[in-house]
Image: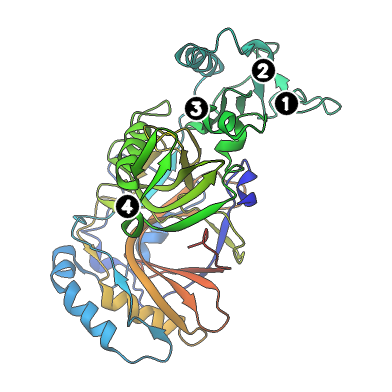
């Protein structure tokens, strides 16, 4: 769990292999068009992407109708390279169309960000406990740090340098024993209401709970479906995980502080139970669902780094009270999603996606696939760019039988492009 002390999400890099199932895309020129609003993404060519549209696409409704038959075929195959025999295939019934997306950011002014910190001091009745003018600091490097002072005073005081910040959208933070908040580019990046930290009796600042530092003693973990009906004694009494999950999702959907982007809801794919003194707490992994299609999610850990960056959703929400999110860290649901092409009613079906894996990866890998899921996958344009293109993908997740490492493989459902990475497995690295 100590890997969660990082204030920035660990970038998980990938290998990209060109698919053999590509064509000029002219056959689909009347179907795939750049979005009418003229949205573009610097460093990424939508025209080039469209030129690689696969010639093997089918109507989405046909893909859904044939899905169960294709599952039966894959699970029955005796393959020495890719084993689907005990794989869980997630439903694709919610897919009505798929899009090529990009991300954008909400950039509040310094006054807007300061106003939000001042509002929260009143909400949590901390006006008389926290000297916000002393503790509100900036980690964006817009103002030079003071290296010979102890943290957090080595960071510039926001009030002292008011008017010198280009924006307040990234880096303003406040940490005390009773409260912690750090802003990211789309709103809150990490937060703690102080309850977990105070209950720990460690006497440390409240950023510890937000970053997972108090979640060392994990007693049980698993997928949400495996864990949802289990219950543990929390601070406010024994509560089922499924009931707490609804409270957590409700809190996040209220906004942090901006509401989730239109069409975005939240999903909890994984849960951990941790012990804190004489009670327990829940750690929920969250990810976005956009118009019925989930984002791929991951966790911090030791990935095999390659040439491009993969940005799976990583967010942890912690609670010991059960009625709300006491602390969290990670992506923000308010991030804007921009459609680069008109929504598509066509995609690669499961059978074609699996065939691509066999053709391009099975020559080098032996894989046991545990889960197949259709997801949105954000891919970095370059190491220097904060922007990414987000492609609709078939995700194949499992274990490499060659070295025992976890493996995640993605096939772009429009172009057939293949992305994958390997990682060392543990209870926290699914």
Q: Residues within 10 Å of mark 2 (few under 14, many from 20)?
A: some
Horizontal and vertical percent position of residue 354: 34, 78
Q: Secondary structure at mark 4?
A: loop
- The reply to whether discs 2 and 1 touch (Cβ–Cβ < 8 Å) is yes
Q: Nearer the viewer, mark 4 or mark 1?
A: 4
Residue of label 2 = 135
Residue of label 4 = 228
Which of pointers 2 and 4 lies earlier in the amino acid sequence? 2
Residue 318 lies left or right of residue 211; in this view the side is left
Residues under labels 2 and 4: Cα distance? Answer: 39 Å
Residues under labels 3 and 1: Cα distance? Answer: 23 Å
Horizontal and vertical percent position of residue 137: 67, 21
Q: Is residue 423 among what the camera can see?
A: yes
Q: Is residue 38 among what the camera can see?
A: no
> Residue 152 — which label?
1
Residue found at x 40% / y 56%: 296
């Amino acid at each position: 769990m100590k890997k969660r002390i990082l204030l920035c999400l660990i970038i998980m890099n990938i290998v990209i292999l060109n698919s053999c199932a590509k064509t000029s895309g002219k056959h689909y020129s009347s179907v795939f068009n750049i979005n009418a609003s003229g949205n573009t993404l610097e460093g990424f060519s939508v025209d080039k992407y469209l030129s690689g549209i696969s010639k093997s696409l089918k109507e989405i409704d046909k893909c859904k109708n044939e899905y169960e038959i294709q599952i039966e075929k894959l699970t029955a195959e005796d393959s020495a390279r890719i084993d689907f025999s005990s794989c869980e295939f997630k439903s694709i019934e919610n897919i009505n169309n798929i899009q090529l997306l990009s991300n954008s950011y909400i950039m509040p002014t310094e006054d807007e960000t300061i106003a939000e910190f001042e509002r929260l001091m009143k909400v949590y009745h901390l006006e008389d406990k926290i000297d916000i003018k002393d503790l509100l600091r900036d980690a964006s490097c817009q103002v030079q740090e003071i290296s010979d002072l102890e943290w957090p005073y080595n960071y510039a005081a926001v009030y002292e340098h008011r008017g010198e910040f280009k924006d307040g959208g990234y880096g303003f933070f406040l940490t005390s024993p009773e409260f912690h908040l750090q802003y990211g580019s789309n709103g809150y990046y990490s937060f703690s209401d102080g309850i977990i930290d105070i209950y720990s009796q460690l006497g440390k600042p409240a950023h510890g709970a937000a970053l997972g530092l108090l979640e060392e003693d994990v007693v049980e973990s698993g997928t949400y479906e495996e864990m949802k009906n289990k219950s543990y004694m929390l601070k406010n009494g024994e509560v089922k995980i499924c009931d707490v999950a609804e409270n957590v999702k409700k809190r996040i959907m209220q906004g942090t502080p901006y509401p989730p982007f239109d069409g975005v809801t939240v999903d909890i794919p994984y849960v951990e139970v941790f012990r804190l003194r004489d009670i327990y707490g829940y750690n929920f992994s969250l990810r976005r669902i956009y118009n019925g299609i989930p984002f791929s999610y991951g966790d911090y850990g030791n990935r095999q780094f390659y040439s491009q960056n993969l940005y799976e959703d990583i967010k942890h929400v912690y609670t010991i009270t059960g009625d709300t999110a006491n602390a969290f860290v990670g992506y923000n649901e308010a991030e804007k999603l921009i459609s680069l092409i008109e929504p598509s009613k066509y995609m690669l079906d499961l059978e074609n996606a699996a065939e691509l894996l066999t053709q391009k990866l099975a020559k080098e890998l032996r894989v046991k696939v545990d889960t197949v899921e259709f997801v949105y996958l954000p891919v970095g344009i370059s190491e220097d760019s904060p922007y990414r293109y987000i492609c609709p993908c078939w995700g194949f997740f499992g274990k490499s039988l060659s070295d025992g490492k976890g493996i995640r493989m993605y096939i772009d459902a429009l172009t057939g492009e293949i992305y994958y990475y390997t990682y060392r497995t543990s209870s926290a690295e699914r």
